Image (tube, grey):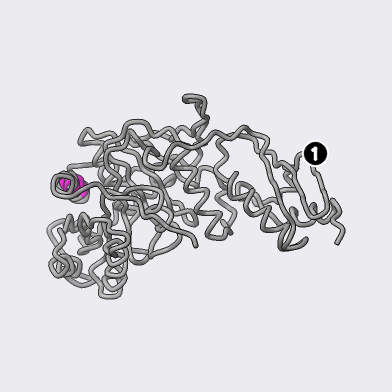
Amino acid sequence: MTIYPKLIHDALSTVRYPGNGKSVMENEMLEDDLRIDGMKVSFSLIFEKDTDPFKKSVVKAAETAIKTFVHPDVEVTIGTKAKTALPPEPDKLLPGVKNIIAVSSGKGGVGKSTVTANLAIGLAKLGFRVGLLDTDIFGPSMPKMFGVEEERPYADTVDGRDLIVPVEKYGVKLLSIGFFVDPDQATLWRGGMASNALKQLITDAKWGELDYFILDTPPGTSDIHLTLIQTLGITGTIIVSTPQQVALADARKGINMYMNEKVNVPILGLVENMAWFTPQELPDNKYFIFGKDGAKKLAEELNVPLLAQIPLIQSVCETGDKGEPAVLNPASPEGMAFMSLASKVVTQVDKRNAEMAPTQRVEVSEK
C-alpha cells in the first residue's frame, strides 16, 4: 500500500479540536513537516499554548484516526510545536495539597454540584486554603455557580513549566473544562480524551498550597472516577443523595465503588440534600416531599457519618444560578446548613487522618 499526504489529511479532517468543534485541518494545526516513509508517518501538530488542556487528547485521537482511516499497521509519530515539560513524579503531583476530597453522587439531579460549591466556599470562609476542580468533563457547572463563565485562565511559568493559573473567587481556586470549551457546543469525546484533559487540569495547573482540594465528580461511576483514583491519593469521599429510594439505591453503588478493596477510599460521610421543603415565607415549616431521613438511615446502616441534611429552599437554586452560592449568606437557614457541613467535614477529615494511613493511588497493571 502507498500512503499519500491526502490520506493523512483526510484522516485528520475527522479529528475535532474540542475547544471549538472544528477539525485539526480546519484549525490549520498540521505543521508543514509531514514525512512518509513506507508505512511510517510522522508530523507535528500546532497548539496555541503549552498548557492547552486538549493537547494529549488530540494527539491520541489523530493517531487513532490514521490507523482507522489509512491502515491499522501504519507507524505514527506525532510531535507538538510547543515544548512539552515532563510532569512530576506521580507521588509528587500536588505536593502542596494536604487533603483531597471527592464529592460524588450515585445519580444526577441530587444537587451534588450545589453542595460542592457551597462546601468549598464554606471551607474558605473558615479560613482554609481551598481549591476546586470541576471534573465533570461533559457537564461542567462550576463556572456558572461561581459567576465566572467569561473567565479564561492564563499560563504562568513555574520552574521552567508553563502552568494554568486557576480562577479565584470567594477565596476558592477554581478550574473547570468549561473555561476551555464553547458552551454552545456539545462535548463529544471518547473516555480517553476526557481522562487526558482531566489529568492536565490536575498536573499542569498552579494549585500551590492548599488545605483542601475538592473534586466535583460526575454522577454515577465512570472513566473519570477511575482516572481520579489512579492519578491522586484521595483522602476521602462525600456522597450526596436525596431521601428518595431510587437516589439512595444509586448512592449505595457509589459508596460500594469507593469501598471496593482495590480502591479503598474512605467514606467521610453522606449529605442528604433536599431533605425537606421549606417555603421562604414559612421558614419553620417542613414538608418531606422526597421522603424522610432516607440518607440518614443509609448512613446508620453503613456506619458512616451523616454530615448534613440540607433543606430544599428556592433561594438555593436562585443564588446558584446567579453565581452567588447560598453559603455567602451564613445567617440564612440554608447558609447555616452549608457552614455546618463545612465544619463537620473538617472534623471528619481530621479524624480520618488521625486514625488511618494516607490513601494510595490505585495502581493498574497492563498485561
Give the camera-side residue of 292 and 60. Answer: 60
The amino acid type of the residue labelled 1 equals Asp
| Magenta: main secondary structure | helix
Point out residue 295 in the picture as x, y percentages from the top left corner: 20, 66
Residue name at image x 25 percent, y 57 percent: 313
Tell me where the magenta segment starts and ends, as one range.
Answer: 338-345
> Which residue, given by chain and number where applicable, does mark 1 sit on?
32
The answer to whether residue 332 is visible is no
Residue name at image x 52 percent, y 25 percent: 160
Point out residue 87 in the picture as x, y percentages from the top left corner: 48, 37
Q: Position of 24 compared to 116: left or right?
A: right
Q: Position of 267 compared to 162: left or right?
A: left
Q: Is residue 117 above or below residue 124?
A: below
The answer to whether residue 43 is visible is yes
Q: Is residue 56 magenta?
A: no
Residue name at image x 54 percent, y 57 percent: 192
Give the camera-side residue of 115 and 259. Answer: 259
Marker count (numbered): 1
Q: Secondary structure at mark 1?
A: loop
Q: Residue furthest front?
A: 367
Point out residue 235 in the picture as x, y percentages from the top left corner: 26, 48
Give the camera-side residue of 293 and 250. Answer: 250
Q: Position of 7 compared to 327: left or right?
A: right
Quarter occupied by residue 71: bottom right
Q: Is residue 87 above or below residue 64?
A: above
Give the camera-side residue of 308 and 226. Answer: 226
Point out residue 122 in the picture as x, y percentages from the top left corner: 24, 42
Residue name at image x 28 percent, y 67 percent: 256
Q: Residues within 10 Å of mark 1 (few under 14, many from 20)?
A: few
Q: Is residue 16 above or below residue 50?
A: below
Q: Quadrant of the N terminus?
A: bottom right
